[in-house]
């Protein structure tokens, strides 16, 4: 299982790097990039779906709750539209296990965290299984302190189901790479 340090270095080394390199300066020196100064680049919201359970625990490591699943670390930044990193943003994740089932009685594969001082979030978990009617997806909620909650979903590139799932939106694709520690999926949330 990757350590926090390894995850943060993966995040720093992830391929979608143009914005991140720009953020290596102190926040006050950040120059907004056109790609995230545009309203169109707000992370789109999506349906919560039928399987959300409120009051999840604060938890970033889900992988041990689905030992048969394929490990994936998902991570990224929470950003404002002018590309500032958002610390202490709520990031909540819930998803199906490797067989496509949700834990609707407890909090397996359900949890939330707050982005760190650099605006980073990450979860160690497993690749969600498929269930009828949907392509492969994670469910997330993101909330900048004091702001409205963004409810959305994240998707996997190359999934056959993406073409037929009417909810799927390619603006919500994880950037997935594979390394020695398993898969790594990168997504930056852009919130109001
Ligand atoms: Fe779902």
Image (cartoon, rainbow, N blue to C red):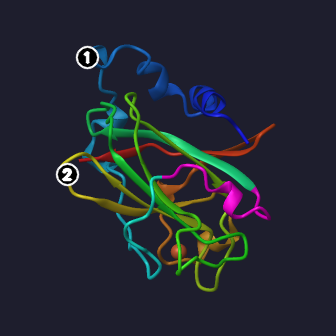
Q: Is residue 85 above or below residue 95?
A: above
Residue at (62, 69) in percent of width and height: 136
* Front in this rendered view, residue 35 or 20: 20
Of the two numbered discs 1 and 2 in the rendering, the one whose residue sits closer to the viewer: 2
- Residue 184 % position (x, y): 66, 44
Magenta span contains residue 66: yes
Magenta span contains residue 101: no
- In which quarter of the view is residue 180 placed? top right
- Residue 176 % position (x, y): 65, 47
* Tag 2 secondary structure: loop
Magenta stretch in the rendered image: 59-70
Write down the residue under mark 1: 28
- Residue 57 % position (x, y): 45, 59
Local packing at callout 1 (Cα closer than 10 Å; few below 14, some 14-19, many 20+) is few
Left/right of residue 167 with respect to residue 135 in the rendered view = left
Q: Is residue 36 above or below residue 173?
A: above
Local packing at callout 2 (Cα closer than 10 Å; few below 14, some 14-19, many 20+) is few
Left/right of residue 37 with respect to residue 168 in the rendered view = left
In terms of sequence position, does the residue under pointer 1 or pointer 2 come before the other? 1
Residue at (40, 28) in percent of width and height: 118
Q: Main secondary structure of the magenta part?
A: loop
Q: Which residue is situated farthest in the bottom direction here?
A: 132
Write down the residue under mark 2: 147
Residue at (76, 58) in percent of width and height: 70
Q: CA distance from mark 1 to mark 2?
A: 22 Å
Residue at (36, 53) in percent of width and height: 43
Quadrant containing the N terminus is: top right
* Front in this rendered view, residue 120 or 55: 55
- Residue 115 % position (x, y): 40, 40
């Amino acid at each position: 299982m990757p350590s926090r340090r390894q995850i943060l270095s993966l995040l720093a080394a992830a391929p979608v790097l143009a914005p991140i390199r720009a953020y290596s300066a102190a926040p006050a020196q950040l120059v907004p990039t056109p790609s995230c100064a545009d309203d169109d680049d707000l992370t789109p919201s999506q349906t919560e779906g039928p399987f959300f359970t409120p009051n999840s625990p604060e938890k970033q490591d889900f992988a041990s709750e689905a030992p048969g699943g394929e490990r994936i670390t998902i991570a990224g930044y929470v950003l404002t539209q002018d590309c500032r990193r958002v610390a202490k943003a709520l990031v909540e994740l819930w998803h199906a296990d490797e067989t496509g089932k949700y834990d609707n009685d407890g909090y397996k594969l359900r949890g939330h965290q707050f982005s760190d001082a650099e605006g980073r979030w990450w979860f160690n978990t497993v690749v969600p299984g498929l269930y009828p009617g949907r392509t492969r997806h994670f469910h997330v909620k993101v909330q900048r302190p004091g702001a409205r909650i963004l409810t959305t979903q994240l998707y996997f590139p190359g999934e056959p189901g993406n073409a037929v799932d009417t909810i799927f939106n390619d603006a919500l694709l994880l950037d997935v790479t594979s390394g020695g520690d398993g898969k790594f999926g990168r997504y930056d949330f852009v919130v109001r």
